[in-house]
Amino acid sequence: MEGLAERARTILVTSGKGGVGKSNISLNLALAARRLGRTVLLLDADLGLGNADILAGVSPRHHLADVLHGRCSLAEAVVPGPGGIDLLAGGNGLVDLPPLDGIRWRKVLSEVARRDWQLVIVDGGAGLTGPVRPQLVAARELLVVTTGEPTSMADAYAVIKLVATHNPGARLWLVANQVRDEREGRAVCERLAAVCATFLGVQVQYLGSVPFDAHLRAAVRRQVPLLAVAPGSPAARAILTMAARLLGLPAPATGGLLAFMARLGIPALKRGGAVAAQD
Ligand SMILES: Nc1ncnc2c1ncn2[C@@H]1O[C@H](COP(=O)(O)OP(=O)(O)OP(=O)(O)O)[C@@H](O)[C@H]1O
Ligand SMILES: [Mg+2]
């Protein structure tokens, strides 16, 4: 039987620089994967600054921070999102958050593990510090989003360097967003990948390019996922292609949710071969 540690393929969407398009790519990738037949949880791990719920046009009564604070159960916080995905919102505007690797975080992840999603897309925060760092070190599969701007590429390089140093062997994907076309996006990623190969000795795979697309801006304003409102738009088509490419490859070994949790340092999940999700 498939081990629990291998289930719920977990992909962290991250970036060095903020505002490059992580949340929109996470949300629409989740919808694309659902279209391709997978059950999907979109987990907004950008605590305190989360906006996946706003982009998805849902208003959950609770969010991850409430669960972390013990104000509600996970079941109460996970809501059906658009396009058949499930969504766990990250909450916004809060300052009294418990540490991400605290006991409640472990509890919520254990609860998540009991559910049977085939794919978990984690919309992470930008940067290298705070709660983002343990996620970068724990994820076995990461999708690094960059634009073609040198500042964004330099920050993406810094993320990849941290992963290469502290999380060797993790599978790294590059996505160029807000580019003119596929040609420009591919060139951006190839340039970055070449620098990573030369200076870090790490392979970074090109996943795809999402063009700058006014449809995406319009979708954000309407609080509807691009894939739901304009599935034929250039950015939506690019994201569908990326999802097919991503799901075409099997998950990396121990690329499941519980293995992700174990690497976040959850002792209960490390015990023995059978992974026991315990409170
Ligand atoms: N492909 C695109 N075409 C046009 N506009 C885009 C595209 N991608 C992102 N944007 C614009 O950039 C904004 C920020 O995107 P998003 O919220 O997904 O970024 P983020 O990386 O999650 O930001 P943060 O670091 O703050 O979490 C969007 O609201 C949208 O206006
Ligand atoms: Mg975001």
Image (tube, rainbow, N blue to C red):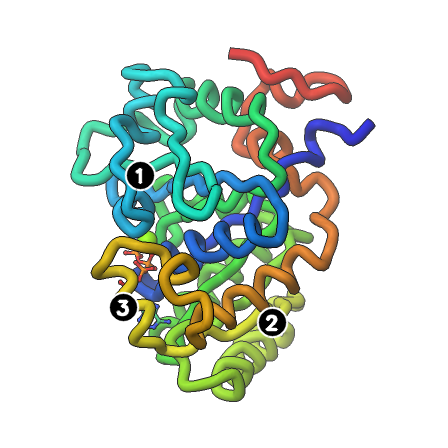
- Left or right, 142 with respect to 49, comes to right
- Left or right, 257 with respect to 88, comes to right
Count of residue discs: 3
From where the camera sits, is residue 183 visible? Answer: yes
**Crowding at mark 2 (Cα within 10 Å: few <14, some 14-19, many 20+):** many
Q: Earlier in the sequence, mark 2 or mark 3?
A: 2
* Mark carried by residue 47: 1
What x and y, as percent, mark residue 68?
34, 23
Mark 3 C-beta to ligand 1 under 8 Å: yes
CB atoms of marks 2 and 3 within 8 Å = no
What x and y, as percent, mark residue 213?
35, 76
Nearer to me, 151 or 237: 237
Determine the residue positioned at 59% across, 17% down. Answer: 277
Determine the residue positioned at 60% across, 48% down. Answer: 167
Q: From this view, report whether residue 229 is shown above or below residue 56.
A: below
Q: Find disc 2 in the rendering and name its residue.
A: 206
Nearer to me, 5 or 219: 219
- Mark 3 element type: helix
Q: Earlier in the sequence, mark 1 or mark 3?
A: 1
Mark nearest the camera among 2 and 3 is 3
The kind of residue tagged 1 is: Leu
The kind of residue tagged 2 is: Tyr
Determine the residue positioned at 32% across, 37% down. Answer: 90
- Give the image quarter of residue 139: top right
What x and y, as percent, mark residue 129?
36, 48
